[in-house]
Image (cartoon, helix red, strand yellow):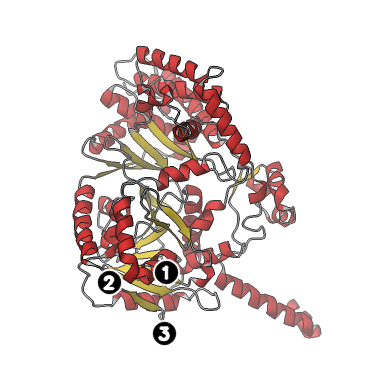
Amino acid sequence: MAQSRFCAVFPQWSKCCRIVSRQYSSSRDRYIHYSKVPTMHYQASLPRLPVPKLADSCSRYLNAVRPMVDGPQFQETEKIVAEFQRQGGNGEMLQDKLIASDKDNKHTSYISGPWFDMYLEYRDPLVLNHNPFLVFKAIPELTNQVDVAANLVWSSVRYRQALFDGVLAPEVFHLQPQKSDVDWFKNIIRFVPSRFAWYGAYLMKAFPLDMSQYNSLFNSTRLPRVGKDELVSYEDSNATKHAVVFCRGHTYKLKCVTDEGVPIPVAQLKQGLQEIISDTRPRPTHPVGYLTTMKRDPWANLRERMLPNNRESLEAIDSAVLVLCLDDKEPTTHEQVSRTMLYGDAANRWFDKSFSYIVSPSGLAALNFEHSWGDGVAIMGLVNAVYKENLTNPQVPATTETPPVGLVEKVDFNLPDSVKEAITKAKKDYEQVTGTLSVNLFQSEIFGKNLVKKCKVSPDAIMQLAFQIAYYRLFKCSPATYESCSTAAFKHGRTETIRPATMATQNCAKAFEKSHPASVEEMLEFIRKSSEYHLQLTKDAAMGQGFDRHFFALKALGKRDGIQEPLFEDPSYTKLNHIIFSTSTLSSDSVRLGGFAPVNPDCYGIGYNIFDETIGCHITTYPNCDGARLVEELNKVFNDLHTVLTGKNFK
């Protein structure tokens, strides 16, 4: 009322209020949010990923190898490592080359180039080998396929527009959010020049993360090429105004951005999606999605064969904002959900795209992403923002009375017989390979983050310790274990490996044998020591002080220059890198389930969630491993850990 009286006296103020109101409304339509701090504000001042000291990496390597090999083999490995790092040896020479290369490429990190090469030179199929999945938690107000899909597209387009216009909030890890994640700080830091902005955040114990991968989220794809694939992001992304929709093996363009650059409203998107779902054409006999399940070189050759008559159709997929897969079969069990979102009906997939949304008939939604272009920070930034938007601002309007014109366009393919034959074979191979995958899920209702923190141990360390104890009980040895850790605190950082199988976890596993005389107090001490060591490994990895990426880069340089280094051919190095437990934490308030396939035939692919009162694991295996047996043992281990952490003895 007071404002109305003020506006009546000062009509010019009233006009300003209307303009600001319209601008805010327009911003809400256009952007998922509007950040005071520009998206790439910290990028120029991000610290560079450090090249670890050679002696430090050698020491960390030996610590990681020790639980894997017996005494004589370890002694031999110690000699090889000593020779590697001696003055004038191969290690020193390769280290000098790496440091020189790093100094010559200050715009990036020393691991970025070799890591991209590793992914893009991979010649086996992407599906099962590279592409993980995440299943969204349900949104209560969105209860059907069309509503969920339309909201996912609308939110994502607004996220994309905020990214392109530089108003998407930069990713920052806040140690003291009450000081750094507040308006007064943002109002100050946005005026600090970009080349100094990181230092201002650091003073407030806030750590900006690398945002370079975000440029490959939208309008991007991995193109198959002979020998080495190519990552393509369409530069004039604002000219691309469509998503690609796969439905019953057919391909469609769905316009999702107006010619003025404004996201198409949800009501109109629903109308377009309903038009696609209502298409009564029979399923194609040779759906092109199966091509993306092939080995990369054959797929590259087929694509070249397809281009003359299908260039526009292929480019429609490659340049699309995103891919949306509308499935027509509902997964009814947890295992079916996992299989559907990890691989599913390849007639309805395009695994080369940077990411795809998959939506079931009931509205169950997931994201499947190609891994070469980026890691968890960029994907989780999108997932968390889209989920939050749909949870707090779900759009459930009735469809428009007048159907929108030109939102949907069918994408057809003119396939030569050789491509049709390849699709038939690819479908057969795909069904055979995916048929060998086993999926097992584990959940504990007696364990959770709250209990573990009360005992003053790390939740992540406890999860990794449980895996180690379970494996030791089954096989009486420690498995080569990989845990992914982001190095996004550095410019163009990717990931580092945490090696959770340590002498500390092995000693704890032995103490948890029923024949071992350790008391409750002693078992608690073993748990604490394992947790402390795991925390140190995690901190080292996050700060770029692991050894895996360092050795990877040194090995790549040696290969380039024809240097045959015995360390990288040592049986200990081979054993350490033949991963038995490939693990990654997928904890997020937006995600109910996530996972990936094993990285080799002897591997367990373990995606795990840690919530306040529960924990869960998604475990995939091939016939060489028994995932059900591991789940059974994990159940016993977590019960025993719970008993000990609550001060009792299970023995």
Instruction: Tell me the amino acid under the disc marked 3.
Output: Val
Q: Position of residue 240 (x, y in %)?
A: 48, 71
Left or right relative to 190: residue 72: left
Disc 2 or 1, which lies upstream in sequence?
Answer: 1
Tell me the element at label 2. loop
The mark lying in front, picked from 2 and 1, is 2
Residue lying farthest to the bottom in this orientation: 402
What is the secondary structure assignment of the residue under circle 1? strand
SS of the residue under disc 3: loop
* Residue 452 visible (yes or no): no
- For the residue carrying disc 3, how many other residues have a C-alpha within 10 Å: few (<14), some (14-19), or many (20+)? few
The residue labelled by disc 3 is 405
Of 121 and 155, the residue lying toward us:
121
Q: Real-space Cα distance between discs 2 and 3? A: 26 Å
Q: Do residues under tags 2 and 1 come within 8 Å of each other at their CB atoms? A: no
Please state, as top left, top right, bottom left or bottom right, where the N terminus lies in the image.
Answer: bottom right
Q: In terms of image quadrants, where is residue 326? A: bottom left
| Amino acid at dot 2 | Asn
CA distance for labels 2 and 1 = 21 Å
The answer, for residue 193, to whether it is visible in the render is yes
Q: Position of residue 89 (x, y in %)?
A: 52, 20
Q: CA distance from mark 3 to mark 1?
A: 16 Å
Q: Is residue 25 above or below residue 318?
A: below
Residue type pointed to by label 1? Ala
Tell me what residue is drawn at x 47 percent, y 53 percent: 379
Q: Residues within 10 Å of mark 1 (few under 14, many from 20)?
A: many
Instruction: Look at mark 1 in the image and give the residue it sits on.
Output: 243
Q: Which residue is mark 2?
A: 414
